[in-house]
Image: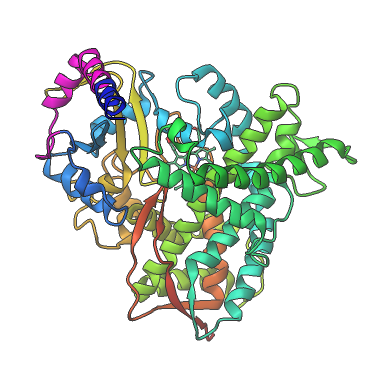
Amino acid sequence: MASAFILACVAILAVFVYRYFKNKRFNELLNKLPSPPGLPVLGHVSKFKKLEGLMDMITEYVDEYDGIVLLRPGPTIKYFAVADHRLVEYLCNSRKVVKSKRYRLFERWLGRGIFTFTTEYDQWKIHRNLITPAFHIQVLEQFVPTFNSVTDVFLEKLSENVNKTVDIFELVNLCALDIIAETALGVPLHAQTNSFSKYVNSLEELLRIIAVRSFSALKVHDWIFRLTNDYDKETEALKVLKGYTNSVIDAKQNTSRSNGATVNGIDKKRRLAVLDLLLEKKGVLTESELSNLVEGIMFAGHDTSGVAMAALFYLIALHPEVQDKAFEELRDIYGNDLEREVTYKDLQEMKYLEMVAKEALRLFPPAPIISKQLLEDYEFNGYIIPKGLNALVSIHSIHRREKYFPNPNKFDPERFSPENQSNITPFSYLPFGLGPRNCVGQKFAMLEMKAVVSKVLRKFKFLPVDDFKLTMIPQIVQKPKNGIFLKVVRRQY
Ligand code: HEM
């Protein structure tokens, strides 16, 4: 027994020594990067015990070290956090930088696809080119009726809770899920009226497991993860999610498109979904690639928009003057008509609401970090950032640096007024990422936010709840730890 233990220790030590010498140059360069003092071997492990406050901690460090800092959450993990606009530009635009391998944690779910491709530039380009027309302005315009009908269910939920406290995050997140299901798949999911559905629960569970893995020094390794309970739970959740998506795809493939006439790829006779447009390109993608692409859109377009809208409601509840100004803009558009549906043209007129949305996305970017990997050494500010290092573009941190946004913790939509917006330093504001891998759904998301929020604000007002304090945690998407509680009041005209 004792000899087996000694043998195991020697083997582990040998692996460490081998890796040390193999990575000698890499480690020497790492040691020169700015980094706060930490423990030998364990590094800054004590700072990474909980997700709560993690983004603020990273922000304080990048500020202290002028935009770049190396943190070591464990003996083998390195986080090179970046919040300098010049380096952000390089990381987002250079062909010598790819998305990091960390996105492989999504692979059991999303396979190799739009969201998870790293070095596979050519394949990614094919998928990106396929999907881009589905977010063309003519197609987005067709989604507006869905934004309206799904938001009507959300309004019913709010009506049931007038003068009460609600968890606005829970409600609006389900609304965002219904919107993405109906626009991406073309099939209503009814998550808002059936929030205990297997699909909703499985999605929650899957996202929880991926988030836990991304911060766990052990579970991040596939072979260790396979030994845990979470692996079985993930398998179950995947069966439900993939089963659902594939059944929708099969049903659509089997339905001949009756009035198949399309204009610029857009069917004028019925509401079209992203999936319909992808099915027109049949033959370019295999069945599993198609399924991965659709799952990728479902993932990327749900939680992100949900949390963005919830944060917006929270911020305007704390700032009644902003809420009133947004409402006045809506009155200019709709007068006292509470029932008129939102049109695409209306959405173009909501200039102030757009400023509010942009500021909410600055303070609470739903994707707080994007993870990149350098394929070549890069010299920056006198440091050599070694090839192979994972660089975390800390969107949350750069948005909260005094240098780029004076008085950064203040909620001030005027930063995005036409006159002020041009003063924002390029590459210091990037809620949707920047460069070729930026968010393909950003126009969709902005229209969706304005459509949902405007419909809600025409009928209701939000007030803060005294004893509620918002705590965000970075679970892939930056989310409220304990919901967002607000009081709902019906507007008096
Ligand atoms: C407020 C809402 C949203 C935010 C803040 C957001 C943010 C982002 C960010 C930061 C990225 C870049 C990730 C990276 O570089 O690693 C991204 C990528 C992506 N987003 Fe969004 N997103 C939002 C909504 C949406 C919606 C509604 C859709 C689809 C309907 C969508 C689809 C995608 C896809 C497919 C990618 C991958 C693009 C690629 O790699 O080529 N997103 N998003």
Residue for point 46% across, 43% down: 210
Q: Which residues are magenta?
A: 13-40
Residue for point 12% across, 33% down: 34
Q: Looking at the figure, which quarter contains the N terminus? A: top left
Residue for point 45% across, 61% down: 353
Residue 360 visible within the image: yes
Q: Quadrant of residue 343?
A: bottom right
Q: Nearer the viewer, residue 410 or 32?
A: 32
Residue 22 position, x and y percent, is: 24, 13
Work out whether 288 lies above or below 343.
above
Magenta span: predominant SS is: helix
Q: Nearer the viewer, residue 339 or 349?
A: 339
- Relative placement, left or right, of 146 versus 491 is right
Q: Quadrant of residue 473?
A: bottom left
- Name the residue at the left extreme: 37
- Number of numbered discs visible in the structure rendering: 0
Residue 386 position, x and y percent, is: 23, 20
Q: Looking at the figure, which quarter contains the C terminus? A: bottom right
Residue for point 49% across, 69% down: 168
Residue 381 visible within the image: no
Q: Nearer the viewer, residue 219 or 383?
A: 219
Please check the rendered image and state whether residue 152 is part of the magenta-colored stretch, yes or no: no
Q: How is the image coloured?
A: rainbow
Residue 100 position, x and y percent, is: 39, 29
- Relative placement, left or right, of 284 versus 458 is right
